[in-house]
Amino acid sequence: MEVGNITTITAFVLLGISNNPQVQVVLFVLFLVIYLLILTGNLLMLLVIRADSHLHTPMYFFLSHLSFLDAFYSSIIMPKLLENLLSKWKTVSFLQCFSQISLVLFSGATEACLLSVMAYDRFQAVCHPLLYVVTMERKFCTSLVGVSWAIGIGTGLVNTFLLAQQHFCGPNLIHSFSCEFPNVLLLACSHPYISIASILTTMVILGLGTLVLLLGFYTRIIRTALGINSATGRSKIFSTCSSHFLVITIFYASGFFRYMTPASDSVLDQVLSLQYCVVSPLLNPFVYSLKNQEVKAALRRMLTRRPRLTF
């Protein structure tokens, strides 16, 4: 669209991962299977936690929110990715693109907060077991989750609003499979100083802030574990912490590199995007929950429970 002598674009084109039709078919099948696994794993966790009263504890309350968020997070990206792999027309409207950016930022910020909340929960359980029930009472847990979601919503809205104030005059080609803040920022024709300052401030305060909290909590947990005489107890704590560190490393490393380094439209950028929007939601149910003995026992009880017949 041309206003006066200034051209304003109204849509973007997602170039995707590959232009080869044969490769696109293979990628469609691969990502469809991954997406179904993400939905199955996370929704199964929600169902098990909801159905089994033994899992109505603060830890699983937080896990249920993480599972819902991961299913939601992947659903922001994967359906459009799958559609574009089979479609000749890969355009996305201005509104759709910025809605996706806002939801991705919201999901990422909320997940960072939830991971910190879950680390705090484990810190209280391991380091202050006698006060755990008093400290992690339901109202406090609900407040922690509410604050996490509120921070995520605010992060998504503020950064997206500032980005939308930029002028986009072309080109409109996004070298990625989704609309993300760094890729769209590259297309701005005006000076995006405010948007850059906003996203960097977000990453420093929210990203580094939650990472410092995570490292602090897990350091205290490990120090407490080293003082436990029981080898079984130490082994259980270290096993849990190592799994959590894997997820945290993938999520934070890919997020920091993606948002705190200049976007380059490279293959590496797309790999980093896939890590935190596909790999993390896929791993989280297995790392945090499905390998947990309590969850396995609850799943067995749910599967072996006889349905009650009512007349």
Image (spheres, grey):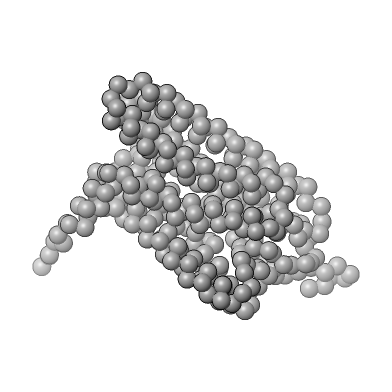
Give the total number of marks visible in the rendering. 0
Q: Position of residue 309 (x, y in %)?
A: 12, 64
Q: Residue at x 16, y 62 (%)?
A: 307
Of residues 311 and 197, the one drawn nearer to the viewer in this rendering = 197
Q: Is residue 297 above or below residue 85?
A: above
Q: Residue at x 63, y 77 (%)?
A: 89
Q: Quarter of the image containing the N terminus?
A: bottom right
Res 135 visible: no
Residue 14 pos. (x, y %): 65, 68
152 lies left or right of 264: left
Q: Quadrant of the C terminus?
A: bottom left
- Quadrant of residue 2 in the image? bottom right
Residue 61 position by quadrant: top left
Give coordinates of residue 232: x percent, y percent. Answer: 28, 30
Q: Is residue 82 above or below residue 61?
A: below
Which residue of the protein is positioned furthest toward the left in this rendering? 311
Rendering coords of residue 199 (x, y %): 67, 46
Q: Residue at x 47, y 27 (%)?
A: 219
Left or right of 256, for residue 68: left
The answer, for residue 175, to whether it is visible in the render is: yes
Left or right placement of residue 120 versus residue 231 in this view? right
Extreme residue toward the right, this view: 5
Outermost residue, bottom direction?
Answer: 88
Left or right position of 76 against 56: right
Residue appearing at x 27%, y 44% in the figure: 293
- Viewer-closest of 73 and 32: 32
- 98 and 3: which is toward the camera: 98
